[in-house]
Amino acid sequence: MKIESVVLMLCAMVIAIPWAQSVSEGPKGVEEWFKELPIKKQKVTKLHFYFHDTTTGPRQTAFQIAESNISSTTVTQFGRTFMFDNPLTVEPDARSMRIGKGQGFFGAASFEEPRFLMNLNFVFTQGKYNGSTLQFLGTNPILHRVREMSIVGGTGVFRLARGIATAQTYFLNDTSSIVEYNLMVQDKIKVMLRYVLFVFDIGNVFIIESAFIIGSTSRIRRTPKIL
């Protein structure tokens, strides 16, 4: 007599990152967090440079392009938006070697504190990253000592990039700022996913645990167990 089996997917739990109650801030904390990721071993690129933003004067690099009807009456200048094309250098000194440009826009996005919504692209023009880019999207609470933003993509050698950027203000006045950036970049990320199948048969329950790697054809399958 043919035995009919009913396969039910009861649980599909994705385990892609370590669980934690708190996350350490700052470049060192981000680097340690990356080391704990359950990812297939591959190269992680660390980048460090300075971002120069100037809003007035003969060397202005950021220009206002829009504002809301309440920008001038709110403490945070809510809605005021700037487009920028800022130099990236290896040292805080603007005369040091330039490695690229930071291009994009930012706008005041909070009523409570100075917090910018940023769409930022780092365009590299020197060395082995020449012609490659990294894309960022997130909010930037500019008065916080350390800010964290997501790397959501890239081009060139950074295709399919994911990562974390930490920003720390090195210098700030009414007309310009210098921001120190530390980046942890993982391209073509491969993350382990696991799922469990419960297979019900007459008199027995089989458990099949399987796993696969995003971004590759690797697959792990364990021998079914009878409960």
Image (spheres, rainbow, N blue to C red):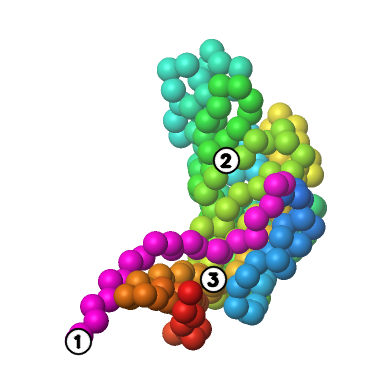
Question: Which numbered disc, 1 or 3, marks the residue that appears first in the sequence?
Answer: 1
Circle 2 or circle 3, nearest the eye: 3
Give the spatial CA distance, label 2 vs label 1: 64 Å
Q: Which residue is mark 1?
A: 1
Q: Is residue 93 found left or right of 54 in the rendered image?
A: right
Q: Is residue 17 found left or right of 25 in the rendered image?
A: left
Residue 164 in the image: x percent, y percent? 63, 57
Which stretch appears magenta?
Answer: 1-22
Residue 152 sits inside the magenta stretch: no
Give the spatial CA distance, label 1 vs label 3: 43 Å
Q: Which residue is mark 3?
A: 191
Residue 125 in the image: x percent, y percent? 60, 68
Q: Amino acid at mark 2?
A: Thr
Q: Which residue is mark 2?
A: 139
Residue 76 in the image: x percent, y percent? 60, 22
Label count reads 3
Q: Amino acid at mark 3?
A: Val
